[in-house]
Amino acid sequence: MSFHRVSVYTARWDLENHSGLVNLAYKENGVTRWKLYTITDPSEFSAVLDFLRNEGPLDLHIPAGWLQSQNEPVGEGES
């Protein structure tokens, strides 16, 4: 599968159009690329931002649109 490590992100909520934009940066062949996602559900937008803020490292699978964390011990107790 084609996973890319997410290095940085930007996020914006459009108050007039009621949608969120999440832009994820990753490296491909040494070049930084960006993948933009539009999220129209406020709960989903909040969940994605929570995932980006609190998990890591994160990998992005572009064709499938997956964002996944790496292996972490059960009960790690992040605070």
Image (cartoon, rainbow, N blue to C red):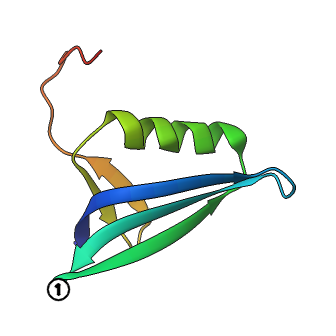
Q: Is residue 57 left or right of residue 41?
A: left
Q: Nearer the viewer, residue 43 or 30?
A: 30
**Residue 66 is drawn in which quadrant?**
bottom left
Q: Quadrant of the C terminus?
A: top left
**Residue 21 is drawn in which quadrant?**
bottom right
Q: Is residue 2 left or right of residue 50?
A: left
Residue at 15% across / 32% down in the picture?
72
Q: Residue furthest right?
A: 16
Residue 52 higher or lower than 5, as above or below: above
Residue at 21% across / 47% down in the picture?
57
| Residue 59 on image: x %, y % | 27, 57
Q: Helix or strand or loop: what does disc 1 sit on?
A: loop
Tag 1 residue: 29
Residue at 19% across / 15% down in the picture?
75
Q: Quadrant of the N terminus?
A: bottom left
Q: Residues within 10 Å of mark 1 (few under 14, many from 20)?
A: few
Q: Nearer the viewer, residue 37 or 68?
A: 37
Q: How many marks?
A: 1
Residue 71 higher or lower than 15, as above or below: above
Q: Is residue 57 left or right of residue 60?
A: left
Task: Say which amino acid is labelled 1.
Answer: Asn
Residue 21 higher or lower than 62, as above or below: above
| Residue 54 on image: x %, y % | 35, 33
| Residue 41 on image: x %, y % | 71, 46
